[in-house]
Amino acid sequence: MSRYKPGARLRSAVSDTEVMVIGAPDTDCTITCGGAPMLAEGEEAPAGAALESGGEGALLGKRYVNETGDLELLCVKPGEGALALDGAELQVKGAKPLPSSD
Amino acid sequence: MPPSSPEVGSPEFPVRSLAEVARLCASPWGLEDYGPLGELPCLLIGTDNGETVPGDPARIAARLRELPCPVLALGPGVPAPLLRGVDVVVENRAAARPLLRNITRHPVAAMTLVQLLRHNEDVEPVQGLLAESLAYATLQGGAEFAAVQAQGLNTAAAVVEEGPPVLVSRRGAELRIRFNRPAARNAYNAAMRDALYEALQLLHADPDLALAVVTAEGACFSVGGDLAEFGRVAHAATAHAIRSARNVASLLLTLAPRLEFHLHSACIGSGIELPAFGGRVIGRADTFVQLPEIRYGLLPGAGGTVSIPRRIGRQRTAWLALSGRRINASTALQWGLLDAVV
């Protein structure tokens, strides 16, 4: 369990994925990628961490949020493994497509 | 006289000497025939007889700066203090013709363009972008654009592309942004705009990204706004709201030092307006640049009335936008629109 701060960078323990924390709940929680807790700067991947199968990997430049919207991550490096908060998979937060202004 | 062959010096396009201009500017009624609602769609100043300007040139320039139509100087002999009142300097009378043709066909667009360029020269870039969007909206609601649309501007079916409109990838500290509508010659549509905006937001959010390089897939960099989408927005005010919500130009302005554009072949309309914001713009030798919006009764509306004057100045920007003519890579390099040709 960790408390995440906006601006923090996390990297996956099991893939290339890296995210930046845009917003985080004010409580202890665990952000995972591919089933393994994501690592803060300086943290080492635990031995035996393995990518959980299933789920979509994170896409570069996309934002990911939990259902309540208090967690928001920006993918700054794409990779395999679904992003999740305390076991609940995060969803892509897309900007609303707008029509042409011409 | 048909508008296709404007005759400089004819009753429709009289050439005024510097002394005449000074006299017209001194009178409160001297310039009342000029403008889209008057008899004369632009003011032509002859500069070839080497005369000095009677009166205060700064006051004359200030008066011309308010004229509701383009002010063209025929030849390079305009005294420096008067240049602030001149929108375009052409080499000679013949060189004025392509501009006069467009000005005659779309005098309101021509007036609005030069007014906007004059305004943007005196304000901060973000203020210029706001003014541009408002000016563009004005013309979107105008009779000239409506007439062009009535002739069937967007009858061509939209080209359906495979894959995302913009490819975004990362290698270390470098972001790579690639326009990816090759079958549509990278015509800039709403989906492409939204994807570019998202990529630029990533660059903005991540200070570890030292550089973003923008390139394009296919035969050319971009032919500009997708004509298939022209005139689709119901209200000009809504169009302004959309531009304000997805303000790509403003993000480009902020991120300019970290942006590099690699251009090739056609860079038309937004295809040069957006790159011109970049801190570094490199063109392949076959690059050419064109601002064709005047032909539609519009003006460059993707930030070009800010980005292009920053590189080449107000008068050359006005020449590009009023003539609709192409310039090649070596001219673009010489003018500073490109930083290098490879």
Image: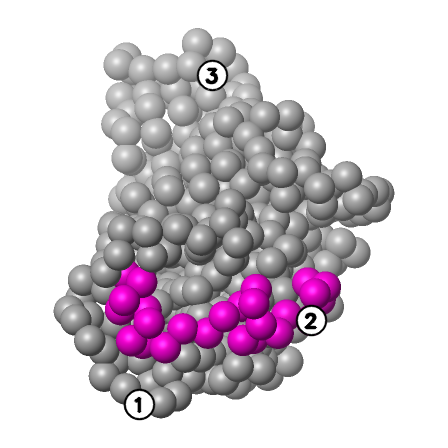
Splitting the image into 4 quarters, where does residue B54 fall? bottom left
Quarter of the figure with the N terminus of chain B: bottom right
Tell me if residue B167 can be seen.
no
Q: CA distance from mark 2 to mark 3?
A: 65 Å
**What residue did someone put label 3 on?**
A66
Q: Count numbered badges in the picture.
A: 3
On screen, residue B266 above or below A9: below
Q: Of residues B276 and B72, which is closer to you in this image? A: B72
Tell me if residue B245 can be seen.
yes
Horizontal relation, residue B35 to residue A43: left or right: right
Q: Residue furthest top?
A: A68
The nearer-to-camera label among 3 and 1 is 1
Q: Position of residue B105 (x, y in %)?
A: 64, 55
**What residue did someone put label 1 on?**
B50
On screen, residue B93 above or below B250: below
Horizontal relation, residue B306 to residue B214: left or right: left
The earlier-in-sequence mark between 2 and 1 is 2
Badge 3 sits on which subunit? A
Pointer 2 and pointer 1: residues touching (CB < 8 Å)? no
The crowd level at tag 3 (other Cα within 10 Å; few <14, some 14-19, many 20+) is many
